[in-house]
Each structure stands twice: as structure tokens, then as C-alpha cells.
Image (tube, helix red, strand yellow):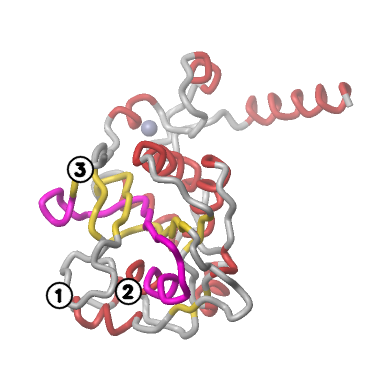
Amino acid sequence: MIVSDRLRGSITRGVGYFFPPVCVFCSAGVDVEADRAEGLPDIRICRHCLSSLPLRRTNRLSCLSNPYPDDPIPDFSVISAFFYEDPIPSAILSLKFGDATYFVRALSYFLSQAVRRDGATFDCIIPVPLAAKRLRERGYNQAERIARDLSEDLSIPLVPSFLERTRETRQQSSVTANSKRAENVRGAFSVPADVSVSGLSILLVDDILTTGHTLHEAALALFRAGAGSVTGAAVSSGRLREQGGRALR
Ligand SMILES: [Zn+2]
């Protein structure tokens, strides 16, 4: 066991020698040992990028950018880590459409921190499921990758099978009108018949919060199945503080 651990350490150092760690945003070298010595997390972000990230420090957001009066879940809110400003948009787009899964650790670390700061506790974490066709094309669900990291960081069980897409929908980013976005995802999610979410406090994870219709519809399916509480979590949102932001406890 000792020998194999030593061997593993040598291999890791060897890989580090040939492929020195670089910043996921700007490709500058990252001094992992120095970062570790200072208690910084190993998330492959250089000091310069780290200091200029557009972090939201104190906001939980109302889910819908355009709330409507008869909303069955008007209090549903979303914890978001970043404003949608450089370098976040290109990171999320690369993660979504460019196979750049190396962004997952860096982005989900800050979302974990935001959830921790928020202080609410959860029984389980559920990612917003991807349509089957899109999952086949992409090979992975970026929301599930982020949710998996959150689950490890926060020691909360990950249960992707508790929510499913019941029909294909168009990519929300290709639907421009707010009302059409609501229509596009209406009834798109359900809790499988053999699953009980009754009374559970759920953290529902997606990559980005735009108009909020996708997260809102997914949360509605969980509430209708008897969930005790649902809180959203999204890496980033372009929403300004004035648009539904409220201070954390
Ligand atoms: Zn950098």
C-alpha cells in the first residue's frame, strides 16, 4: 500500500512536470503548492483571475425575472455565485457546447461557497435534467456535473433520478420571447412514480439563471410531488440586484 501510494505520488508529480497546471481562464501558470500553503483551493485559477471574478457576495434571487400574480410558487428563489460578466459567459458556453468540463471544478467551487454562506440546509441535491436527445449529443449534463461537485463539497446526497424530462424542449437560449420560454418548458419535468420527494428539502441545480422558466418549471414538478422546500442554485445569472435580488440572512 505504501509503495503504491508513493508510486501514485511520483506519477502525479511526473504528470505535473510535463503538464504544469494552468489557469482555466487565461492559461497562465498556477503555483498549486503556493496556493495550498496559503489555504487557497485547488481550482486552477491564477491569482489575477481569482481577484477579478464577478462574484455575487450577498444575493439570493427570485427565480422569475418577470414574476406573475398567480404563480403557485412565488417564493421560489435561487442562489447564484456569479454575475454574468467576463470571464463567466465564455466559461459556461464552453462547458455547455465546447466539451470544456475542466471548468466544472472552478465554477462549482464558488457555487458551493455561495450555498454555504446562504446557510440553508438540504436533504438532497437534484440537477435539472437534460433532454435525452441533447444528453446523447453532448455526452454529459453540465448541470449534473456541477451538482456532483456540490454534493461532494457540501456532503449532501446527489439524486439525479428524482427528476426527469418528460418531453423534448427547444434550447431555451434559442427562444427569445419571455412568454414563449415559459411555454417551451411547461410540463417538461416530472418526478418518477417510484420516487418519493415528500417533505424533502431540495437543492435544485442548473448552470445558469436567465428568465428562470426552466428552474421554475422543474421546481414546480418537485413541489407538486410533495417536496417540503425547493431552493435553486445556478452558477451565474445576469440578473441585476434591483431585479429581484434580496439580501441573505
Ligand atoms: Zn488566469
Q: Position of residue 31 (x, y in %)?
A: 50, 21
Q: Secondary structure at mark 2?
A: helix
- The residue identified by callout 1 is 69
Tell whether label 1 touches label 2 (CB within 8 Å): no
Residue at image position (32%, 74%) is 172
Q: Nearer the viewer, mark 2 or mark 1?
A: 1
- The residue identified by callout 3 is 247
Q: Position of residue 125 (x, y in %)?
A: 51, 56
Q: Secondary structure at mark 1?
A: loop
Query: Which quarter of the rendered picture does the N terminus lie within?
Result: top right
Q: Position of residue 42 (x, y in %)?
A: 52, 30
Q: Is residue 46 above or below residue 141?
A: above
Residue at image position (32%, 83%) is 184
Residue at image position (43%, 35%) is 27
Is 226 one of the magenta-colored residues? yes
Residue at image position (16%, 74%) is 68
Tell whether label 3 touches label 1 (CB within 8 Å): no
Q: CA distance from mark 1 to mark 3?
A: 22 Å
Query: Which quarter of the rendered picture does the C terminus lie within?
Result: top left
Whether the residue under disc 3 has CB within 8 Å of ligand 1: no
User: How busy is the neighbourhood of tag 1: few (under 14 within 10 Å), some, or many (20 plus)?
Assistant: few
Is 70 one of the magenta-colored residues? no
